[in-house]
């Protein structure tokens, strides 16, 4: 079953929300609209693929403030800003903070739909990366403390003999642990193990 793609719209102008809802639905997306940032934070539920079409000027939190609030989360939706009062410094800040696009009102319908398509692509990539990191962390949890040590030494590029010296054990013991690490982590090579460690934020061992 194909996942529903949701576009969240946050704009305090009721007529604009209605217009955006109609336009975005015409492109095949599910739309949830909110009149304020606080309403969005209370009611949104971004379990599936999504993005956020966000007005800069809102009655409570500004669009930029909401962007900052969402950035604190482990997974946050890509943002497309729309505004009738934007300026260059504001747009630069929004883009530096990760916004997909910054569209001044009035904008062309095709420009907004193109920005939403781009945002959905970014969200799909982000979700895929997040799932991969979670998978790696689950595999890491299966390692014993000693296997975790051997893994951190292995990703430095050291040979078994060198690792054995650092750990004060035998080369044979390290070889056994290393084999178990590769099996449990489902890694075909040390290079793959290094990439997995980087994604999960596991630093190599240091002398």
Image (cartoon, helix red, strand yellow):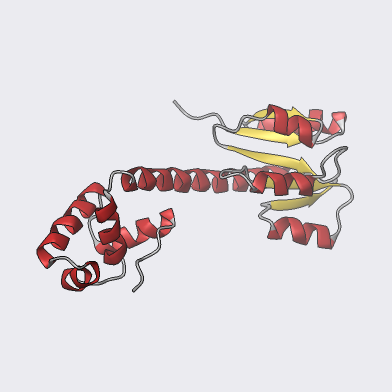
Q: Which quadrant of the figure has residue 74?
A: top right
Q: At x 29% / y 66%, what residue is drawn?
A: 153
In screen coordinates, is 19 left or right of 119? right
**Residue 195's spot in the image, x, y percent?**
36, 60
Q: At x 16% / y 62%, what residue is drawn?
A: 174
In screen coordinates, is 40 left or right of 117? right
Q: Nearer the viewer, residue 22 or 199?
A: 199
Residue 134 seen in render: yes
Residue 111 seen in render: no
Q: Quadrant of the N terminus?
A: top left
Q: At x 37% / y 58%, what residue is drawn?
A: 197
Is 6 drawn above or below residue 169 in the view shown?
above
Is 197 drawn above or below residue 20 in the view shown?
below
**Residue 78's spot in the image, x, y percent?**
63, 46
Is 95 drawn above or below residue 54 in the view shown?
below
**Residue 28's spot in the image, x, y percent?**
61, 30
Image label count = 0
Q: Nearer the viewer, residue 81 or 162?
A: 162
Q: Quadrant of the C terminus?
A: bottom left
Q: Which quadrant of the figure has residue 192?
A: bottom left
In screen coordinates, is 145 left or right of 126? left
Which residue lies most toward the left here?
172
**Residue 93's spot in the image, x, y percent?**
76, 59
Q: At x 88% / y 47%, what residue is drawn?
A: 84
Is 203 drawn above or below residue 106 in the view shown?
below
Which residue lies most toward the front here?
168
């Amino acid at each position: 079953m194909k996942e529903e793609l949701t576009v969240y719209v946050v704009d305090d102008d009721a007529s604009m929300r209605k217009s955006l809802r109609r336009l975005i639905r015409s492109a095949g997306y599910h739309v949830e609209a909110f009149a304020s940032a606080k309403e969005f934070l209370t009611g949104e539920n971004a379990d599936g693929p999504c993005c956020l079409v966000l007005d800069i000027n809102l009655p409570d939190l500004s669009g930029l403030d909401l962007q900052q609030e969402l950035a604190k989360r482990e997974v946050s939706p890509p943002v497309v800003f729309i505004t009738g009062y934007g300026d260059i410094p504001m747009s630069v800040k929004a883009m530096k903070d990760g916004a997909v696009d910054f569209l001044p009102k009035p904008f062309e319908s095709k420009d907004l739909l193109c920005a939403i398509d781009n945002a959905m692509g970014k969200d799909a990539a982000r979700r895929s990366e997040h799932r991969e990191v979670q998978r790696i962390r689950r595999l890491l949890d299966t390692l014993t403390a000693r296997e975790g040590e051997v893994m951190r030494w292995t990703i430095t590029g050291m040979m078994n003999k060198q690792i054995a010296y650092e750990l004060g054990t035998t080369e044979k013991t390290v070889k056994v642990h290393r084999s178990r690490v590769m099996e449990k982590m489902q890694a075909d090579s040390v290079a793959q193990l290094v990439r997995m460690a980087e994604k999960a934020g596991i630093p190599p061992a240091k002398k």
